[in-house]
Image (cartoon, rainbow, N blue to C red):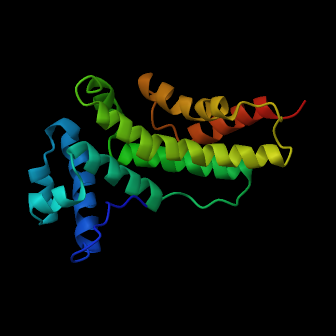
Amino acid sequence: MSTPQTRAAGRPRSVEKNAAILQAALQLLATEGYTRMSLSQVADAAQVSKSTIHLRWKTKADLVTAALANLRMAEAPPAGGGTRADLVAILDDFAATVQRVRGMALIGTCLAEEAHTPELLALLRERTVIPRRALLHAVLDQARSRGEIRADVDLETAVSALLGPFYADYMAGKGGRTRWAEEAVDLVLAGLRPA
């Protein structure tokens, strides 16, 4: 779980306040979008002072990406159902998280703001994109070690192939299809199996 840095001395930070701030940030992100939400709004919604937020997170980008990382890690699906089931669970969890926080709009904002606020996209990658890709990579790596997929498979490309249909469907106006994850996993695994 993503947590703010702790201080070496002084009173420990309240776990309850941290949770309230992160939850408020997610709610405002979903209702207002990144550009319109402010730290003052987050402070009001969490019933804390703005300085309480600044003690934990340096910028709005830092707070928002910490909230998204916290949500992702808190709800990451358990592994152990087999390669196909684990990949589908990770993709379903990814889609649910993106939809819950209007994540495609956030991604668009991060890309649009890259020239002016590059840390926003960098933090989004570091805290949400890369860890999610790592989950998929780990499942595929285990499948490769069990001989379920070819030894020469480029796992990073396979991860991109698993995630790609979600973005492509959204851009084509077909987002939210109920079986997209199963279809993506079946298609990718079919191409990765040993001859």
Report the front residue among 150 and 27. 150
Indicate the quadrant containing the N terminus: top left, top right, bottom left or bottom right: bottom left
Please give the name of the residue rendered at 59% of the width and 48% of the height, measured from the top-left corner: 135
The image quadrant that residue 108 belongs to is: top left
24, above or below 12, in the image:
above
- Direction right: furthest residue: 195
Give the percent coordinates (x, y) of residue 170: 43, 29
Give the percent coordinates (x, y) of residue 29: 24, 46
Please give the name of the residue rendered at 51% of the width and 57% of the height, measured from the top-left corner: 76
Give the percent coordinates (x, y) of residue 18: 26, 66
104, above or below 74, in the image:
above
Report the front residue among 10 and 182. 10
The image quadrant that residue 173 belongs to is: top left
Report the front residue among 75 and 11. 11
Indicate the quadrant containing the C terminus: top left, top right, bottom left or bottom right: top right
Give the percent coordinates (x, y) of residue 130: 50, 41
Please give the name of the residue rendered at 83% of the width and 34% of the height, measured from the top-left corner: 150
Report the front residue among 117 and 160. 117
- Direction front: furthest residue: 8
